[in-house]
Image: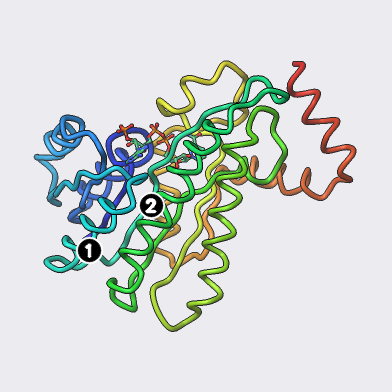
Amino acid sequence: MILITGATSGIGRQLVEDYTKSGADVVACGRNLEKLAGVKDDCKAHQGKVLTLAFDVTDRAQTTRVLSDFLREQEITVAILNAGVCEYIDDPLHFDAALVERVFAANFFGVVYCLQALLARMPVSSKIAIVDSMARQFPFVRAEAYGASKAAIHYFARSLQADIGQNGVQVITISPGFVKTPLTDKNDFEMPMRVSVEHASLAIRRGIAKGKSHIAFPRLFGGILSLLERLPRGIQNYLATRMKQS
Ligand SMILES: NC(=O)c1ccc[n+]([C@@H]2O[C@H](COP(=O)([O-])OP(=O)(O)OC[C@H]3O[C@@H](n4cnc5c(N)ncnc54)[C@H](OP(=O)(O)O)[C@@H]3O)[C@@H](O)[C@H]2O)c1
């Protein structure tokens, strides 16, 4: 069975649809019961079945309890930890630390709580894929909190990959570029090479099926960011500031 967090919207919701269409059974996780019921209803004609689990990933006790209880009854072979939020900092000189805490609560600690419940309870041959973001690769303006939370969870996942090695669950990192979802629909700036949720879902499902340890899409945007990352710091800062002005 495949477990997906953040399954009520955007990339996660599309993954539930596509996996169940292909015959896989999915545990769709979210914090809103109505939205979860909607996801289940939308997939009722599909070959695979949808179970739902409600918990808020920022609540450590709830997340670990709900997931541990579930794993006592059912086996998960793939978990995609995708739930996340994005908030931008509008005034860098007077930013609100509470905003940074909210973003880290979901994007960093939310994943860590899921990992605590899942890692030791999933079969050795299973996979856990952790969604970060290409935003972690470049100092995008206003993205201090979001980019830092994604860089932090990416590092955590990579360190886990090395630490677990061949002795347990395979940890996979996923770095999407811009994807058209309710999360990015709120953005008021240009989003180069933004792809559809169908594109994102296909890239993620293919990468997981092929046993990749890192999945990044769209490739061209990832390649450009990797080049930008290698530029001298002063040039990176100049380019990031130019993006703010444009
Ligand atoms: N879209 C992009 O361009 C993009 C790019 C790079 C990375 N990502 C990452 O991809 C992931 C999915 O993003 P998306 O664009 O599909 O966003 P989305 O449409 O806003 O969906 C986010 C999902 O996460 C859930 N979620 C948020 N906070 C939660 C919490 N505290 N507890 C449980 N569930 C929670 C949401 O549930 P509710 O419905 O209850 O809010 C929703 O199901 C995120 O981690 C995001 O950072 C997205």
Residue 188 against residue 157 in the figure, above or below: above
Q: Nearer the viewer, mark 1 or mark 2?
A: 1
Left or right relative to 243: residue 177? left
Please give the name of the residue rendered at 82% of the width and 30% of the height, measured from the top-left corner.
Answer: 239
Q: Position of residue 21 (x, y in %)?
A: 21, 46
Please give the name of the residue rendered at 73% of the width and 24% of the height, measured from the top-left corner.
Answer: 93
Please tell me which residue lies in front, 240 or 191: 240
Please tell me which residue lies in front, 178 or 124: 124
Residue 42 against residue 133 in the figure, above or below: above
Dot 2 falls on a residue whose secondary structure is: strand
Labelled disc at residue 68: 1
**Disc 1 residue type (three-letter):** Ser
Circle nearer the N terminus (1, 2): 1
Residue 120 against residue 128 in the figure, above or below: below
Please tell me which residue lies in front, 63 or 138: 63
Q: Quadrant of residue 16?
A: top left
- Neighbor class of circle 1 (other Cα within 10 Å; few <14, some 14-19, many 20+) is some
Q: Quadrant of residue 105?
A: top left
Q: Which residue in the protein does label 2 denote? A: 81
Dot 1 falls on a residue whose secondary structure is: helix
Q: Position of residue 191 (x, y in %)?
A: 60, 26
Does the numbered disc 2 mark a residue whose Cβ is under 8 Å from ligand 1? no
